[in-house]
């Protein structure tokens, strides 16, 4: 029976990594839930400011769509929690059933040993068992056997007690888990009602915006034009930096060739040869060892870069987006070259996300843009009302470079467009920012 009990402990230890993983997953769920709730509160605060306006705007629709999406994520989070709890309860039931069978077996075996002991309880029988030994050594062995048998019975009792404790512990755990499940189900019902209300509110806003479809199309067309102008301006800056780096490399190669014409790895450059054919195996944007180190440090901080504003959320994500105004028509669409971060109010300080050099300060329409180079990486901060740096300024992580202008979507909040490029390639900045 000791072996059986130890086997139970072995299975529990074997299951420990699974329980540990579940604990980690639950902690992640709780963290995600808190982040969703925080963002919902921020969006709700902004939405409360605009929902009473007589004029519905795309910004208002964007906020309510964002709320609906977050609410769906919140409910999905609760559903995952419910699945975890249900799995826990199921496994706990299986464990209780297994332990109960084991307890029944232990009790039955103990009962048989008691019956046997009762039938042979006479002192004469035990003495006869010992003195009937054929030799002294045999007698000593029989005494040892009787002692082991007594210890075995004591272990049987201990195993029964420990198994009963495990069963009670599992049952107490089940009570707590069932209580958690009831609370999660209640919360699920409450959040589902909130989602229904949000969808009705969204439907009302969409209904009122239908009559303004042409106006909204013009707004989005203007935005697409501004986005394209922004992309072109940033691309021109990146090309200029690449050309400058290539020219510097070609110049160094020419100087090295003059100083050491018998170099082991000579670089022959004919007059008029494009710079990009020189040292073509090197990243073209690297102009120095400092650039190389800066790029490496930027890459090493992926997922840990600070946000360019202290308070805000992603109002429009990177890449394609759409607004469904009329279910019978095609949605209004666009492509965001970066992420649009909404702030509680205009004037919020905008900070650079990493060390680098300001390589561009320019205007697009009525707002300002700052582009910073971090080795082969470029970050741009658009829709600024004012700028506190100039081209050539060396900046440090967290340094204020300007202030957010008012959002153009009618919400009354602030807004910046944050773009990230790896040389000429646009990438999604969200994966690079701290969660």
Image (cartoon, rainbow, N blue to C red):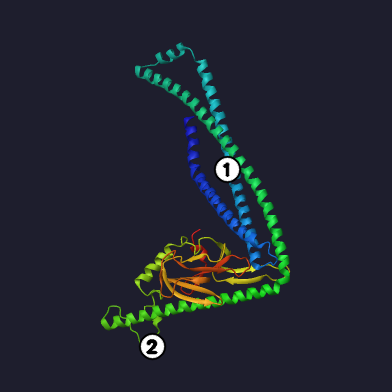
Q: Hey, which quadrant is residue 279 in on the image? A: bottom left
- Residue at 60% x, 52% y: name it: 77
Residue 88's disc number: 1
Nearer to us in this view, 358 or 19: 358
- For label 2, the residue is 272
Residue 273 image point, x, y percent: 38, 86
- Residue at 52% x, 20% y: name it: 114
Q: Is residue 289 left or right of residue 79?
A: left
Q: Is residue 248 left or right of residue 340?
A: left
Is label 1 in contact with label 2 (beta carbons under 8 Å)? no
Residue 121 image point, x, y percent: 49, 14
Element at label 1: helix
When the figure is inspected, residue 214 is found, relative to residue 56, above or below; the finding is below
Residue 338 image point, x, y percent: 54, 69
- Residue at 60% x, 42% y: name it: 180
Q: Hey, which quadrant is residue 167 in on the image? A: top right
Distance (Cα) linking label 1 and label 2? 72 Å
- Pointer 1 local density, CA inside 10 Å: few below 14, some 14–19, many at least 20: some
């Amino acid at each position: 029976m000791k072996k059986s009990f130890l086997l139970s402990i072995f299975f529990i230890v074997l299951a420990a990594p699974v329980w540990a993983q579940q604990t980690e997953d639950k902690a992640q769920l709780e963290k995600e839930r808190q982040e969703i709730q925080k963002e919902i509160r921020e969006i709700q605060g902004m939405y409360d400011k605009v929902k009473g306006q007589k004029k519905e705007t795309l910004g208002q629709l964007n906020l309510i769509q964002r709320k609906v999406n977050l609410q769906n994520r919140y409910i999905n989070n609760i559903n995952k929690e419910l699945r975890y709890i249900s799995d826990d309860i199921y496994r706990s039931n299986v464990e209780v059933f297994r332990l109960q069978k084991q307890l029944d077996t232990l009790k039955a075996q103990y009962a048989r040993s008691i019956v046997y002991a009762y039938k042979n309880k006479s002192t004469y029988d035990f003495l006869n068992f010992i003195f009937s030994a054929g030799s002294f050594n045999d007698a000593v062995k029989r005494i040892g056997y009787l002692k082991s048998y007594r210890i075995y019975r004591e272990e049987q009792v201990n195993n029964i007690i420990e198994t009963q404790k495990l069963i009670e512990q599992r049952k107490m755990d089940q009570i707590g888990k069932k209580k958690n499940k009831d609370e999660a189900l209640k919360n699920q019902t409450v959040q589902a009602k909130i989602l229904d209300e949000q969808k009705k509110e969204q439907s009302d806003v969409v209904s009122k915006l239908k009559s303004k479809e042409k106006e909204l199309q013009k707004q989005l067309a203007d935005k697409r034009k501004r986005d394209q102008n922004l992309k072109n301006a940033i691309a021109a800056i990146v090309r200029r930096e690449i050309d400058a780096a290539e020219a510097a490399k070609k110049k160094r190669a020419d100087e090295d060739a003059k100083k050491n014409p018998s170099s082991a790895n000579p670089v022959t450059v004919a007059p008029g040869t494009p710079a990009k054919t020189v040292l073509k195996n090197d990243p073209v944007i690297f102009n120095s060892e400092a650039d190389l180190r800066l790029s490496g440090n930027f890459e090493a901080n992926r997922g840990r870069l600070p946000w360019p504003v202290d308070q805000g959320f992603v109002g429009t994500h990177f890449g394609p987006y759409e607004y469904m105004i009329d279910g019978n028509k095609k949605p209004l669409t666009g492509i965001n070259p970066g992420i649009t971060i909404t702030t509680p109010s205009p004037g919020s300080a905008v900070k650079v996300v990493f060390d680098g050099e300001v390589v561009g300060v320019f205007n697009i329409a009525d707002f300002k843009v700052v582009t910073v180079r971090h080795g082969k990486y470029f970050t741009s901060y658009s829709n600024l009302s004012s700028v506190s740096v100039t081209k050539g300024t060396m900046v440090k992580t967290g340094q204020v470079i300007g202030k957010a202008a008012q959002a153009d979507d009618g919400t009354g909040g602030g807004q910046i467009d944050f773009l990230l490029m790896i040389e000429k390639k646009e990438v999604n900045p969200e994966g690079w920012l701290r969660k």
